[in-house]
């Protein structure tokens, strides 16, 4: 790294900020929004092929380029990983293997032999997660009898009953309703080949003691399996009809369910099994929506699918970053973005109203179209963004902001924190049922979401109010012993610190507070030798990885944001972080970041937000160059 004097650091930081700002402005869509690619692992692509094969609509124009993409992501050891640079993952590798067999890759091909050998060494199909084995069961490659029972009757349970559908996080409930219907019908449409070559013959994993919650639920699963063989006909019919209605009422205008892949594909399968042909309007919209989520690269001959799209999130973050970089509040780019965001306000009741029936609608969702599931994180960031813009006719936007603030306040959980989508969605028993062996299935308050709301409340002049006071108490109680915060929706402690410290300072916590100083010490201790910061996603499960990983633009920016907020702009740590950003910036104004720094499910599913590598450095450089007093309005 080049050693520069402090004035030189300021100068090169300003130059880098200017180039990055120009790049970000150039990525705005004419309608006013920003959207970067949301990259995940190849299970999304493999399941797209499996879905289309099951529904009888898989054609070469989809199969060939998607298979090319899946092949391009195979590692030297024959596996597929859940994130760039990560280790091979069994279920991901099995699904990719099955998809390539659909594409005609022979089991004897070298790349397939390597995959198969690794799969068998790691337990075979027998040790994959439940959802992978469910996909295999659809084609007769796995017996339905060896899957946990998910009776569709659970959709009939009242919302006060234990383990009812609303005890699960919104993404889980949207998925479990159609999955329960599919599991009840146990369809088999035999695949064109046998996958016995990746069956290891291992017996089922040993049961846990019945005295543990997991063991007790395994015994409950035995009872549910018995019921599944001879269910009550009238009750089952009612559950299936209710399930169909539940699914149809939640389909979004773009054809999706919640704007995310898991409930989307299972809802399509469930509707198909219930007699909805591929030409039914609901199914047509679903297919058309999936096609809009596809990214085509004809030159490379590949096709990949986004698991979700994030325009509201990307737009609000871009607006905040540009404002921090000094773009004028009445700049046409910010005005267009603010008008677009105002149009995206959610004005209807969704599942959140089950727990808050008297709360008036408001807020924003993550996607282009998702009116049933606005989220608190987006609402907070949108309000922060809109307050940074000077509009020629501000009344309509001001009213939307007021409704968004009121809705967010009404969604505070009982312990003072905020989850992403629901209130008090903390029923831990949901995590322990045999079916839920993949991904988080509840939505408890998190440090990053709570911090974003606190920062928003500070910008609204509400930092001394009861809601902010309780939230700051929540954040204080959930600080880790090492001074960091767990990052639920971003990787990991760096994301937590990058969210909490600026929010706390904005809300009036002094920079000298012991908790702030603890976070600063954590950042100083975990700074890489090159001046940047990085944290590998293995940190969610392996303690030794916490705060450790190759430097990335987004994670370095999170650290710089926290340091600037904590009054450490003049520190060596902040200067070295900024120098790393300057020296790693590309000539195009952005940064190269193949690493995944976003989190879907900690420990299981991760995201590379392609705009993170630009929007957060713009924000960090902006606050470093222009200063930041903690005021956001």
Image (cartoon, helix red, strand yellow):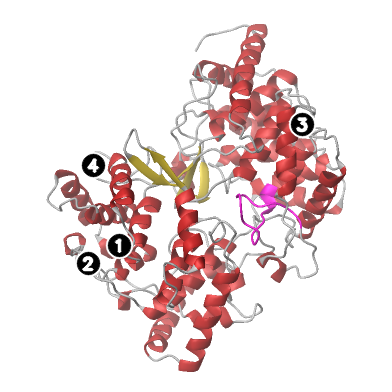
Q: Residues within 10 Å of mark 4 (few under 14, many from 20)?
A: few
Q: Nearer the viewer, residue 249 or 381?
A: 249
Q: According to the image, label 1 marks what residue?
A: 127
Q: Is residue 399 left or right of residue 115?
A: right
Q: According to the image, label 3 marks what residue?
A: 512
Q: CA distance from mark 3 to mark 4?
A: 50 Å
Tags 1 and 2 in contact by the CB under 8 Å rule?
yes
> Nearer the N terminus, badge 3 or badge 4?
4
Residue 148 occupies which quadrant of the picture?
A: bottom left
Q: Nearer the viewer, residue 47 or 585?
A: 47
SS of the residue under disc 3: loop
- Residue 193 on the magenta span: no
> Nearer the N terminus, badge 3 or badge 2?
2
Q: Nearer the viewer, mark 3 or mark 1?
A: 1
Q: Nearer the viewer, residue 595 or 221?
A: 595
Residue 168 occupies which quadrant of the picture?
A: bottom right
Residue 106, above or below 57: above
Residue 319, above or below 247: above
Tell me where residue 437 appears, x and y as whole percent.
43, 64
Residue 104 visible within the image? yes
Tell me where residue 72 appears, x and y as whole percent.
30, 39
Q: CA distance from mark 3 to mark 2?
A: 57 Å
> Nearer the N terminus, badge 3 or badge 1?
1
Q: According to the image, label 2 marks what residue?
A: 202
SS of the residue under disc 2: loop
Q: CA distance from mark 4 to mark 1?
A: 19 Å
């Amino acid at each position: 790294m080049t050693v520069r004097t402090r004035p030189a650091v300021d100068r090169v930081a300003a130059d880098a900020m200017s180039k990055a700002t120009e790049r970000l402005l150039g990525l705005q869509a004419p309608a006013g929004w920003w959207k970067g690619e949301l990259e995940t692992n190849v299970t999304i692509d493999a399941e797209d092929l499996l879905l289309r094969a099951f529904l009888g609509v898989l054609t070469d124009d989809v199969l060939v380029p998607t298979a090319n993409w899946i092949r391009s992501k195979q590692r030297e050891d024959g596996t597929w990983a859940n994130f760039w640079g990560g280790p091979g993952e069994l279920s991901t590798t099995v699904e990719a293997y099955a998809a390539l067999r659909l594409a005609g890759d022979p089991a004897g091909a070298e790349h397939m032999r390597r995959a198969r050998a690794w799969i068998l060494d790691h337990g075979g199909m027998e040790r994959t997660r439940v959802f992978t084995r469910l996909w295999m069961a659809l084609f007769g490659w796995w017996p339905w009898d060896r899957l946990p029972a998910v009776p569709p009757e659970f959709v009939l349970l009242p919302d006060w009953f234990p383990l009812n559908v609303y005890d699960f996080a919104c993404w889980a409930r949207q998925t479990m309703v159609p999955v329960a219907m599919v599991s009840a019908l146990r369809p088999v449409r035999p695949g064109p080949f046998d996958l016995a070559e990746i069956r290891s013959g291992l017996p089922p994993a040993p049961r846990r003691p019945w005295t543990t919650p997991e063991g007790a639920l395994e015994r409950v699963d035995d009872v549910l399996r018995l019921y599944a063989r001879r269910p009550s006909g009238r009750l089952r019919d009612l559950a299936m009809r209710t399930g169909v209605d539940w699914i149809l009422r939640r389909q979004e205008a773009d054809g999706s369910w919640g704007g995310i892949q898991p409930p989307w594909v299972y809802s399509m399968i469930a509707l198909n099994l219930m007699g909805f042909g591929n030409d039914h309007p609901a199914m047509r919209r679903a297919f058309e929506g999936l096609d809009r989520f596809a990214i085509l690269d004809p030159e490379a001959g590949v096709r990949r699918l986004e698991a979700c799209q994030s325009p509201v999130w990307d737009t609000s973050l871009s607006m905040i970053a540009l404002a921090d970089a000094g773009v004028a509040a009445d700049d046409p780019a910010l005005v267009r973005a603010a008008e677009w965001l105002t149009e995206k306000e959610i004005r209807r009741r969704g599942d959140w109203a089950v727990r808050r029936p008297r709360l008036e609608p408001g807020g924003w969702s993550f996607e282009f179209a998702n009116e049933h599931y606005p989220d608190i994180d987006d609402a907070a960031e949108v309000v922060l963004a809109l307050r940074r813009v000077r509009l020629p006719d501000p009344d309509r936007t001001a009213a939307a902001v007021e409704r968004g603030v009121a809705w967010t306040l009404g969604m505070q959980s009982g312990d003072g924190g905020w989850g992403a989508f629901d209130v008090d969605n903390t029923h831990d028993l949901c995590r322990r049922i045999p079916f839920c062996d993949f991904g988080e299935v509840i939505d408890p308050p998190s440090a990053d979401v709570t911090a974003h709301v606190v920062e928003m409340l500070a910008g609204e002049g509400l930092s001394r109010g009861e809601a902010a006071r309780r939230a700051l108490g929540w954040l204080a109680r959930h600080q880790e012993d090492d001074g960091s915060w767990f990052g639920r929706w971003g990787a990991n402690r760096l994301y937590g610190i990058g969210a909490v410290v600026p929010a706390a300072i904005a809300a009036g916590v002094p920079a000298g507070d012991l908790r702030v100083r603890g976070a600063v010490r954590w950042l100083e201790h975990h700074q890489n030798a090159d001046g940047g910061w990085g944290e590998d996603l293995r940190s969610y499960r392996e303690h030794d990885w916490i705060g450790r990983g190759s430097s990335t633009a987004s994670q370095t920016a999170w650290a710089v944001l926290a340091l600037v907020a904590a009054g450490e702009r003049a520190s060596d740590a902040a200067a070295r972080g900024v120098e790393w950003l300057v020296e790693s910036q590309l000539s195009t104004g952005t940064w190269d970041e193949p690493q995944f720094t976003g989190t879907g499910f900690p420990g299981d599913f991760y995201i590379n937000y392609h705009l993170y590598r630009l929007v957060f450095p713009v924000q960090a450089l902006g606050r470093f160059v222009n200063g930041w007093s903690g005021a956001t309005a």
